[in-house]
Image: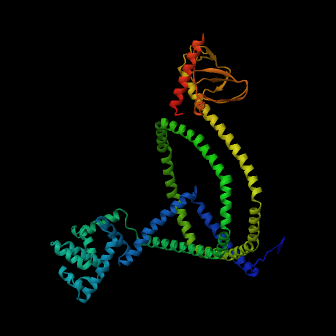
Amino acid sequence: MNIGSIDIDVGLDQKGFNKSVKGISGKMKGLGSNMAKFGKGMAKNVALPMAAAGVAALAFGKKIAGSLDRVDKMSQQMSMSAGAFQEWDFIASQSGTSMESLKTGMKKFGMSMDELSTGVGVGADAFGRLGINMEDMKNKTPEQQFEATITKLQGMEDETKRNAIAMDLFGRAGQDMIPILNSQSGSIDDLKKKAHELGLVQSDEAVKAGAAFTDTLDQTTRMAKGMAVSIGTKLLPMINDFLVWVQNNLPRIKEKFKEVFETYIQPVLEKLSTFFTEVLIPVFNKFKTWLDTNMPIIKSTMKTVFEDYIIPIIEELVTVFEDFLLPILGTLYDWIKIWFPVIKDIIVGMLNIIIPVIETVWKLFRDNILPILSDLFNWVDGHMPGIAETFKQGFGVISGVLETAIGFLSDVVEGFRTAIDWIKKFNRQDISSKDANIEGPGGGMVNMESVTGMRANGGHVTKGNDYIVGENGIEKFTAGQSGRITPNSELAGAGGININIDKMQVRNDNDIKRVSRELFNMVTSTNRGSGR
């Protein structure tokens, strides 16, 4: 087909494509019919299906199945039944050893049994010293032979000889088995009984089911990995071509990224940093102070909420899991086990359709789109000054907005701080009536009814409005025009010198000289103190 001036060759096998779609369609119909039946069965048990609970249940089931699979595999390696393995697993844990150690000992014990059957070797000699012959063992299973040997060793009084025989029969594992051998005869049976009472011994059917689940899960995981490798193999050439293009243009790309970052991104980040440090951090500090003050109340409230609401909800969720989700998972597992081959065929069929499409799209991109992108990059490179100017203007607008926002929030924070300072001063005033007058710095009364805001610490003012000012006492100021009041602290920080003169009287030339001398001394002292 032809799109504009771009020729596109769609390399799909139409006949094979239709055949694959038709095959998948038939399988999907059969799968859909059975899924409908499955949905009806699930509806009887579903109350509130929860995805998170399902994932947790799957992880829990995987862990249980893994434990059962261990029993199945290791019991076969040690020539034991699944039940005997679980009994000895409990006995070993109670004696400070492990089944891994006993597994090593069982391997050596099997070799010792071979030597007993031939009558030659260290094993045959050790069995002879223990008082056991082949007639005693030939009709017993391997686990019965093992238990009979343990019982004999437990009955020996000479511990030195007993331990030597154990080392000859079980190898190094005999040393790990000494705590078992030190226990009294009959204690093995007691521990086996205790394992059953504690529910630690599962049936052979449960062990086989857990092993089957683990094997199926492993096969599914491997299949998924294989599919991922297959898809990745198809995509690697495309990714490689793209990376080669990036490498060929990397110096120019790096230069443009550096220019964009330094010109546009860095100024914005600096503005955001200023906003964070000058606005957000003070707000967070105020919140932290409030949080520290109210922490006892918060803790008490959280404890009540947890005990009265959260714990009952968790208990209800556990009930839902046990009564509803476990049956659902069992049914789902059975359904997946039956329909897994069909699902696999559907996925493979879909991949056979999708991968050629991906290859065709990549060919289109590589042969047609990628050259256009390369030309576009060259065009942008040639017109970068104009583009840079446009971005500069745009970021100038953004910068102005950020400055306005920062100024507004700063005023809000300053307003809160001023209000707090004024409230502190106001609380120290002796107000004998309920009118809106408070005492000013000169002893006069200031009417508060017309006051718009507090500007003792500086801030914006609007023409015609009244404000409270005065760092050392309350004074009312009426703004003749809009502007900003700058406090003495900022003037001093900017390099000025502030001198407060209260009740000065000038009567003659001597007074003028005295005042000049005092002012000179004050300026000199201030400059010396600030290091000027």
- Quarter containing the C terminus: top right
Residue 367 rendering spot, x and y as whole percentages = 75, 74
Q: Nearer the viewer, residue 509 or 430?
A: 509
Image coords of residue 95 (percent x, y)? 28, 66
Task: Report the number of discs.
Answer: 0
Residue 26 appears anywhere in the view: no
Quadrant where the N terminus sits is: bottom right
Identified at 71% across, 49% down, the residue is 395
In the current view of this chain or complex, which residue is farthest to the left?
158
Q: Name the outermost residue toward the top.
A: 507
Image side of residue 181 versus residue 204, left or right: left
Residue 340: name its quadrant.
bottom right
Q: Where 500 falls versus 25 (above or below)? A: above
Left or right of residue 508: residue 296 = left
- How is the protein colored in the picture? rainbow
Place residue 143 in its image quadrant: bottom left
Q: Using residue 200 as the reference point, say whether residue 240 is left or right of it.
A: right
- Percent across and percent down for residue 449 are 66, 19
Residue at the spot 67% in from the left edge and 64% down from the top edge: 253
